[in-house]
Amino acid sequence: MTLARLAKGRIYYGWIVLAGSMAATAIGAGVSIWSFGLYVDPLEKEFGWSRAEVSAGFSISLAAAGIAGPLVGRWIDIRGPREVILVGAIMTAATYALLALTSSLWQWFLFLSINAVFRQMMFFIPFMALISRWFAQKRGVALGILGAGFSMGAFVAVAVEAVISEFGWEGSFIFSAVVTVGFFVPFSLFLVRDDPEDVGEFVDGEPQTQEDREKPRMLRGMTSREAMRTPLFWFIAAAMTLFLFGVFGWIVHQVPFYESVGVSRSTAAQIVALTAGGGIFSRLAFGFIVHRFRRVEIAAMWLLAFLVTGMLVLSIDTSAAGISIFVVVWVVGSGGGPLLEPLLLTRAFGLSHFATILGLLGVIETVGIIVSPLAAGVIFDTTDSYDLVLMMLGAALAGSFVLFYMASRLPHPMEELEAAADPPPH
């Protein structure tokens, strides 16, 4: 008897899918994004590479993942997230084993890029699409819980740091491969279902209208071409590009930054874990309150106000007190980060082509993601300091604030389409 049948009549199966997705997100983010900074120092010492060269590996790999995003999204929209997650997990685990064989810079670039492409299939896009399919009225709460899983990934990164200390960076990549295949394969095979209809249920656990009871659910929304013809898409894309420029540049370089101001690597990892621990609660809180905002763009502006403040604090004071204040402010500001894209896109453009639109948005955002870590590495190598890096990241976040304000003044095209499709009765 399947878990879906056991749960039927007792608990909405979407909550079970969400719980597993949260754990999967924690593992996927923990062995990749949260751990990136942990590999900088070991690789510099073993191969004599500069910080910019190591960072370039991350940037190139993220570019490859971004380019693959629309294809992954299209696959999800056609075949569903479950199949994509399963294939992606197996191939990602294989590429982690390949990374353990790295012996030259070109291999670091190539193997990391292959890993990033397959990781795109088992991480952000499929889970955002999956949870958005299972929840509608409760989507903000559900995505907040999923986002909490992203924060929990920092605790996985603490384990990665311990493995690096004990077995080296090669052993850490083998560890990542085992953990990935050990969790994601059974998860996708035995727990994930693409849609509530697969287990005989309705979105959010109950039908919203009598019409829902009488006919199969149809995903509604704009095509990717229609979305890209709207000004709102491009304002969201520009705002998110700068947002991720600021946030991702910090994520990759936070451990090296702390080390540069006299903090040990183990303590730096603990600070990262503490930041992520706070992020669990801030993401949950954001998920609960985001629907109180008329526009998600306004909520994003509040987040960015905190993030800009955090960069200013750290630029002024890198003492224990300054770092403590920064952590508190950053936790609040970064809380809703992983939720912004799915909430913005589903509200503006609907669900039927959501994964494809998200993948296309990712191509644009990749510019910010790949340039930021690389630029930060070059600046540090040139100045032997992160002072200018903090200014650069803060300026990008401030620019994102302005663009989100401009986006908030534009109409939602999906609302206009639904109004035209369902005119009020006379």
Image (cartoon, rainbow, N blue to C red):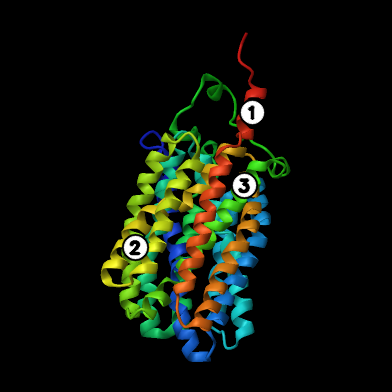
In the rendered image, residue 161, in percent from the top left (x then y), is placed at 38, 76
When the figure is inspected, residue 200 is found, relative to residue 258, above or below; the finding is: above
Tell us which disc is closer to us: 1 or 2. Answer: 2
The quadrant of the image that shows the C terminus is top right
Secondary structure beneath label 2: helix
- Near mark 1 (Cα within 10 A), the count class, few <14, some 14-19 or many ≥20, is few
When the figure is inspected, residue 343 is found, relative to residue 149, above or below; the finding is: above
Residue under numbered circle 3? 235
Q: Residue at (39%, 45%) from the top-left corner?
A: 286
Q: Amino acid at mark 1?
A: Glu
Tell us which disc is closer to us: 3 or 1. Answer: 3
Secondary structure beneath label 1: helix
In the rendered image, residue 201, in percent from the top left (x then y), is placed at 48, 33
Secondary structure beneath label 3: helix
Q: Amino acid at mark 3?
A: Phe
- Compute the Cα span from label 1 to label 2: 42 Å
- Near mark 3 (Cα within 10 A), the count class, few <14, some 14-19 or many ≥20, is some
When the figure is inspected, residue 87 is found, relative to residue 284, above or below; the finding is: below
Total count of labels: 3
Residue under numbered circle 2? 326
Q: Is residue 84 visible from the viewing direction of this image?
A: yes
In the rendered image, residue 131, in percent from the top left (x then y), is placed at 49, 45
Residue, far top: 426
- Compute the Cα span from label 3 to label 1: 18 Å
Residue under numbered circle 1? 416
Q: Residue at (63%, 42%) from the top-left corner?
A: 232
Q: Earlier in the sequence, mark 2 or mark 3?
A: 3
